[in-house]
Image (cartoon, rainbow, N blue to C red):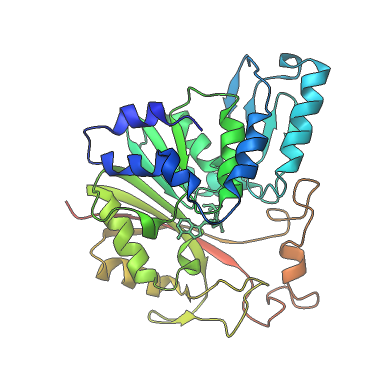
Amino acid sequence: MDYSALKDLITETKLEPLTGFTETDYLDQLKYGDFPRWRELLGKFPAVNITSVQLGDIVKFGANNDLDPEKHAVIKSLLQEMIPWRKGPFNVCGIPIDSEWLSNLKWARLTEALPSLEGKKILDIGCGNAYYGFRMLDQKPEFVIGIDPHLAYVAQFWALKHFAPNLPIYALPCGLEQFPRSLHGFDVVFSMGIIYHRRSPIDHLQQCKQCLKPGGELVLETLYVDGPAGYSLTPQKKYARMSNIWFIPSIGTLENWLTRCGFKNVRIINKSITTTKEQRKTEWMPFESLKDAIDIVDTSKTIEGLPAPKRVVIIAKSPS
Ligand SMILES: C[S@@+](CC[C@H](N)C(=O)[O-])C[C@H]1O[C@@H](n2cnc3c(N)ncnc32)[C@H](O)[C@@H]1O
């Protein structure tokens, strides 16, 4: 939870307004997510010196023999207190965290088409525990800033960063709507798995654009439905058991939204069907998962009778 390195990086840059989100005053006033509980839990992680960090499909901090058995047991139990782990997988000093999502599969779908991240300033909107942010570090960006209003996930990030405090990655507990307008300070912005949660997808895209430098790139990943340009699905109540889904567009609609928001060079990178191999219940996320949201007889439908989840990755450029 030490943001001093981030502050040094952004002071006297266009991103300086973000320091507000790192101040104790701001963190103390967070209404949702029980900040004191997370602060206490994070304070219990013992000091460790790890010998390696591996930023591969399984993001690994340290090795088995970096911990004595006593510390191993303490750390495992603290990490278990942070269940559910939705994004991953991770391995902390030999403790495997088998998350609900095999997020490495999404990363593999987009990684080859990504613009170079080397030396770049990156924003990951809806970063969760920052699994993707850690993967981005492999390309040596200047830094990655993730944002997510869900404090439990940001706390998971803080727990992981405890093992590699010098990595240039930071997560701020806030939503995009709280961000200062017109920062125009990031080279690459990721918005993955967010736009269908927003009541106004157009405002979301406009805000993504305002975060980007002129000529910067947006990596947009979302659910989509089949249908003509102009079509999008608004569930009557729930979609795949989720009550916070507002618009699931067709791909033509997404292209249209992006173009009307001023993005250029809109490219469809990948389309996929989400399977129960990629999203499933595990020891580290023992609650309902995709299997419980799909019709048992007709797996092309959700239990609400809507089209089952399909996802698309799009990359687009902010105007220069
Ligand atoms: C479906 S998950 C996607 C996580 C990750 N980006 C991925 O692609 O796997 C949506 C994430 O967005 C976060 N989120 C929801 N509303 C948000 C907002 N307004 N601004 C930023 N993040 C938000 C949620 O807390 C959650 O962690």
Q: Is residue 56 visible?
A: no
Total tally of numbered discs in the picture:
0
Tell me if residue 200 can be seen: yes
Q: Does 238 sit left or right of 245 as displayed? A: right
Q: Position of residue 136 (x, y in %)?
A: 46, 36
The outermost residue toward the bottom is: 236
Position in image of residue 229 (x %, y %): 38, 79
Judge by depth and name the residue closer to the eye, 64 or 55.
64
Q: Is residue 70 above or below residue 192?
A: above
Task: Decide: is 230 above or below 98.
Answer: below
Coordinates of residue 308 in the picture (x, y in percent): 64, 72
Instruction: Classify residue 60 as left or right of residue 184.
Output: right
Query: Percent x, y for residue 302?
Result: 68, 75
Of residues 18 and 255, the one drawn nearer to the viewer in this rendering: 18
Residue at image location 66% in from the left, 72% down from the top: 240
- Where 28 falls versus 42 (above or below)? below
